Image: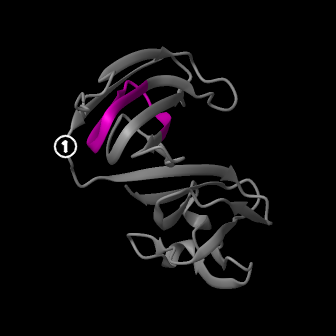
Amino acid sequence: MPTRSPALTTRSDQRALAPRSGDAALEDLLDAESGLACWRVVEVVGEHPLELELAWSAGSGSGARAQLTVSRSARVSVFARNLSVRAGNLAPEPNRVSVTVADGQAVTRGVYEVTGDGSGQDQPVAIPPFAERVRLEVSDPAQLATSVLLVQDAQGALRSTVPADRQPPEGVSLGGAGEILVRAPLETAWRVLFTLCL
């Protein structure tokens, strides 16, 4: 009976992503599988900011999926037999992106960013998989006190209202949050940063 190997069919790849126009379209960067699941360290490096989507499975099930926003590089550790990586350019110029996968385990953290412009209304922001904390930032520091992060539970009940100028430095814990809402003054650019536990 042949032994199964933890070696992946592909360990690295690279792609030149076209300049962003509109929403970032994700392109396949790596698709690999092996005979056995083991800890993998995935490193992605780009010349410019990019969106990243990782999907992995340790067996024959549907597995897990995570989204990250990467300024230049990221390292993620996953227990996987099958692994796919997709990337989308966030820059207005071409972006050469490379990925390498090594066997091993490392303590890693990721970030996922959602951006918007204030409308004076509550704007919903979906919570990504593996998010454990969230932080609201605004483009105009004078609008910090009037910009608010609202946390609803899974039943839609408001559980927390946090003005942007009163957030803890590490962000607000998500706990059992079902949805995040952002309330920012009209025409105030904002971004929500989720800290991911990966």
Q: Residue at x 50, y 65 (%)?
A: 135
In percent of width and height, residue 14 lies at 38, 17
The question of residue 58 being in magenta is answered with no
Instruction: Depth check: give the residue in front, 17 or 7.
Output: 7
The C terminus: image quadrant: bottom left
Residues shaded magenta: 31-54
Please name whichever residue, 86 or 168, is drawn nearer the observer in this view of the structure: 86
Query: Seen in the image, is 197 located left or right of residue 105?
Result: right
Query: What type of secondary structure mainly makes up the magenta span?
Result: strand
**Residue plotted at (44% across, 26% down):** 31
Image quarter of the N terminus: top left
The crowding category of the residue bearing disc 1, from other C-alpha atoms within 10 Å (few below 14, some 14 to 19, many at least 20), is few
Residue located beneath label 1 in the image? 104
59 vs 102, nearest the viewer: 59
Answer above or below: position of 93 versus 161. above
Amino acid found under the numbered disc labelled 1: Gly
Q: Would you say residue 148 is visible in this rendering?
A: no
Q: With 137 as the anchor, is 182 left or right in this view?
A: right
Q: Position of residue 37 (x, y in %)?
A: 31, 43
Q: Quadrant of residue 25?
A: top right
Secondary structure, mark 1, is loop
Q: Total of numbered circles in the picture?
A: 1
